[in-house]
Image: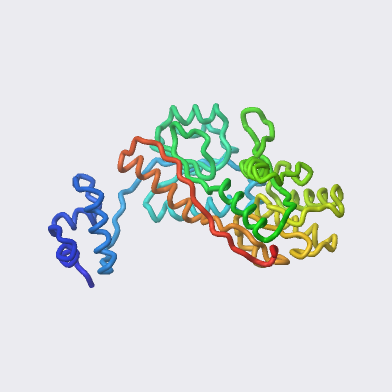
Amino acid sequence: MATIKDVAEMSGYSISTVSRVLNNDQNLSVTEETREKIYEVADKLNYRKKTVRVLVKNVAFLYWLTDKEELEDVYFKTMRLEIEKLAKAFNVELATYKISDGIEKIPDSIEGFIAVGTFSDEELAFLRKKTTNGVFIDSTPDPNHFDSVRPDLAQMTKQAIDFLIMKGHQQIGLIGGTYHNPNTDMDEMDIRERTFRQYLDEKQRLKEGFIFCRRGFSVDNGYHLMKQAIETLGDDLPTAFFVAGDPIAVGCLQALNEEGIAIPNRVSIISINNISIAKYVSPPLTTFHIDIEELCNNAIKLLLERLVDKRKSVKTLYIGAELVIRKSTN
C-alpha cells in the first residue's frame, strides 16, 4: 500500500507538503498546479486515506414541491433522496423544510441552504436576509446572489432536434409542460419550449400547430396532450415528437398505442430524464440521461466551497446529459 512518503518521492514535493495537501489543510498556501500534481500522483499510486470531513451544521434543505408534484415526477423524489444521502456522506447536517411549512419557518440560525423547486421574488428576498450561502438545484432564480447547478435543458433540446433531423424527420412536434411563475400565478413558456421554438425557427421548420403544452409533467398530462394532438392533426400528425420529460412521454406512448399508431415507424418519441421505467415501456424510450447524483454532488460541493472555503463569487453550473437511444426512435 502506497504511503505519503511514496507520493512525496514521485511528485518531488516534501513529505510535509504532500501530507498537508492530502489532508486538506486550509492554511497551506500552494498553487493549484502543485495540488493537482500531488493528487495525480496519489491516484496513480492508489494512495488511500481515511477521509475526515468537518461537520457542517445549520444547513437548510428547502424542498419547495408539493406531495402531488413529487408523486407525478419521480425526478424530484430521486433528487431529494440523493441530497439526503450525500449530506450524510459529506458530514452535513440538514434540516428539511417543505413548501407546506412556509418560508417563515426557516430560522435565523441557518448558515446556508440547498433548494429545489420554484421560489417567488418575495421568498428569495427573505433568503437573502438569512444567508449569502445558498445553492439551487434545477433552476437559477437568483444568479446575482446564490449558486445553482442544473441540467443543460437548452442544449438537450437542440441535440434532440439535430438527432431527429439526422434521422430524416421533416416534421417535429413538441409535447411538454409549462413553468408556473409564483410571482404572477401564471403559466409561462418552459425553457425547453422556448429553445424548441427558437432552434426550429432558425432552421425554418417551426410549425405552431405541432406544439402542445400545458401545466404538469405527469403521465396523465402526456396522455391528454398526445390524444389532443392526434384528434387535432389526424393524418398530419408529425413523424416525431420531442417530449419535455419521461413521465409525459410514458403518457404519450400510451395514447399512441391505444390509437394503433406505430412507434417508431409512424411517430418517433425522444424525451428527457431516463427514469428507471424508460427502458421497460413499449417501446423502450429514447431519452437523455440526466445524472441526478452528479447534480446533487455538485450542489453539496458548491455549498461547502461557500461555507468551508469561504468562496465569495457566485457560480452557475450546467451539467450535460447522455442521449440513450432505444426503440422509440428510428
Instruction: Name the quadrant containing residue 185.
Output: top right
> For this rendering, which residue is in front, 234 or 257?
234
Does residue 66 show up? no
Q: Is 281 drawn above or below residue 153 in the view shown?
A: below
| Mark count | 0
The residue depicted at 62 percent of the width and 43 percent of the height is: 195
The residue depicted at 25 percent of the width and 69 percent of the height is: 45
Image x and y of residue 316, in percent: 45, 41
Q: Is 51 drawn above or below residue 44 in the view shown?
A: above
Q: Is 184 drawn above or below residue 157 in the view shown?
A: above
Does residue 58 show up? yes
Instruction: Name the quadrant containing residue 204.
Output: top right
Image x and y of residue 233, in percent: 84, 49
Image x and y of residue 295, in percent: 48, 51
Colour scheme in the image? rainbow
The residue depicted at 60 percent of the width and 49 percent of the height is: 158
Residue 195 appears left or right of 263: left
The C terminus lies in which quarter of the figure? Answer: bottom right
> For this rendering, which residue is in front, 108 or 293?
293
The residue depicted at 60 percent of the width and 38 percent of the height is: 100
Image x and y of residue 199, in percent: 63, 44
Residue 283 appears left or right of 57: right
* Residue located farthest toward the bottom when viewing the structure as drawn: 1
The N terminus lies in which quarter of the figure? Answer: bottom left
Residue 112 appears left or right of 167: left
> For this rendering, which residue is in front, 231 or 63?
231
